[in-house]
Amino acid sequence: MNLRDVEVFKPYTDEFPEHLLLAEGVDDDLLDRWIHAEILRIARYEGEIVGVYAMDRRSSEQTQFDLHGIVVERGTRRRGLGRWLTGHALGVAESKGGRTVWLKSPGRSDCFRRMGFVDIADGLRFDAIPE
């Protein structure tokens, strides 16, 4: 997979990749949060949806975002797509004035730490402009 061939964009209403989230055992509450997220992006490769991420602006602070997670289709894992989507999400947050991105209970936290996320009590935090 060449990451340059992956398209990332807002999904049309009939393109929500529910199958990716259900394959990961996402519960109904989290699925609902993903469906109604302020920022939802899908990754498409060779016509197939291979990844998704969702995040919302924190209501209390306009410069902070909650990243609900990044899901990559099992057959395309270990090729850099998750890392690439994480970078995309951080870029979108920054373009909307974001300074901090929070991630609760990540599955592969080592990958996120290598990208600059730091441990906090209930997950990880990324500071766009470290203090």
Image: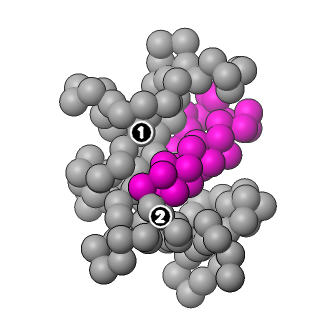
Left or right? Give the position of 78 relative to 7. right
Give 29 or 95, whichever is nearer the viewer: 95
Give 82 or 8, whichever is nearer the viewer: 8
In magenta, the rendered stretch is 71-96
Q: Is residue 32 visible?
A: yes
Whole-percent x, y for residue 83 in the image: 67, 46
Q: Secondary structure at mark 2?
A: loop
Displayed quadrant of residue 120: bottom right
Q: Which residue is mark 2?
A: 98
Q: Residues within 10 Å of mark 2 (few under 14, many from 20)?
A: many
Q: Residue at x 35, y 64 (%)?
A: 57
Residue kind at label 2, given as amino acid type: Gly
Left or right? Give the position of 8 relative to 84. left
Q: Residue at x 52, y 57 (%)?
A: 94
Q: Secondary structure at mark 1?
A: strand
Q: Which residue is mark 1?
A: 41
* Quadrant in the picture for the N terminus: top right
Whole-percent x, y for residue 65 in the image: 43, 66
Looking at the image, which residue sits at the far top?
46
Q: Which mark is in front, 2 or 1?
A: 2
Left or right? Give the position of 40 relative to 119. left
**Does 90 lie within the magenta span?**
yes
Looking at the image, which residue sits at the far bottom?
121
Q: Residue at x 51, y 35 (%)?
A: 51
Q: Residues within 10 Å of mark 1 (few under 14, many from 20)?
A: many
Whole-percent x, y for residue 73 in the image: 54, 34
Q: Is residue 105 visible?
A: no
